[in-house]
Image: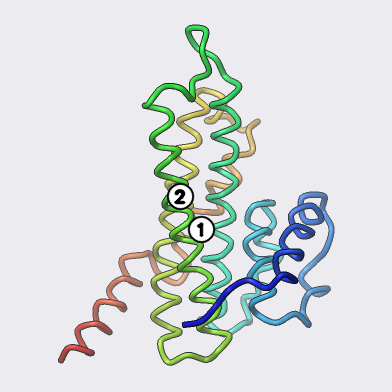
Amino acid sequence: MQFAFTEEQELLRREARTVLANGGWGRDELADLGLLDRAVLFEEAGRANRGEEFFDSAAPEDEQLAALALEAVGIAAKALELGIEHAKTREQFGRPIGVYQAVAHPLADTYVETELARSLAYWAAWSVSECEDEASIAVAAAKAYAGDVAVSACERSIQVHGGIGFTWEHVLHHYYKRALWIQAYRGYPREQRAKIAAWLLDREA
């Protein structure tokens, strides 16, 4: 596999982060973009809590699952961002709560997991875009892992926020519900992993 972001895609990411957060753009406006360019937007739509607007249920299954894996990465990244921000500003015993290991370590775990999920999700998108033989396996791996990571990221961020994180007033519950939906869509991660295991065993037979 040979894949790296182009300068144009990085510029698109930065623009999308601002535009989507402010309610701009819609799925129809981006229909002419290639899958790898849309992949950047799927991630940023997840970060902006607008993934549902950009999800195309009429797309081929592999493309759907790759898009959801990317959205899940955006959700995890946003949950992490919210958790870090709160850990830096909320104080207990005269110190920011982020200095305590019980708060910092779960956030560090989320960062590592989100970066791995991002790599898998873009591998899946690239594989689908290039019609690779292993595209369905890449998609299964990305969707299974990224869905779990998004759910865990939201749960950890809610815990970091304490009481406010459990309320309807806080935005985290929107991300959490969407992450749970992604995790379940077209089969929970155990089903995706069973598909990968069957493929691996078949290769060794």
Front in this rendered view, residue 60 or 115? 115
Residue type indicated by callout 1:
Trp
- From the top left corner, tell me how far across and down residue 117 is, in percent: 46, 61
Residue neighbourhood size for the residue with mark 2, other residues' Cα within 10 Å, grouped as few (<14), some (14–19), many (≥20):
many
- The residue located at (52%, 91%) in the rendering is 131
Category of crowding for the residue at label 1, using alpha-carbon neighbours closer than 10 angstroms: few (below 14), some (14–19), many (at least 20)? some
Question: What amino acid is found at the position of numbered circle 2 in the picture?
Answer: Val
Residue found at the very far left of the displayed protein: 205
Q: Quadrant of the C terminus?
A: bottom left
Residue 198 sits in quarter:
bottom left
Q: Mark 2 — residue?
A: 151
Q: Mark 1 points at which residue?
A: 181
| Residue 72 percent coordinates (x, y) | 53, 58
The image shows residue 64, relative to residue 172, as above or below, that is: below
Mark linked to residue 167: none
Of badges 1 and 2, nearer the viewer stands 2
Residue at the (79%, 52%) spot, across then down = 18
- Residue at position x 47%, y 45% in the image: 153
From the viewer's perspective, tell me whether residue 74 is left or right of residue 138: right
Q: How far apart are marks 1 and 2 (CA)?
A: 10 Å
Please, is residue 28 above or below residue 160 in the view?
Answer: below
- Secondary structure beneath disc 2? helix
Give residue 33's quadrant in the image. bottom right
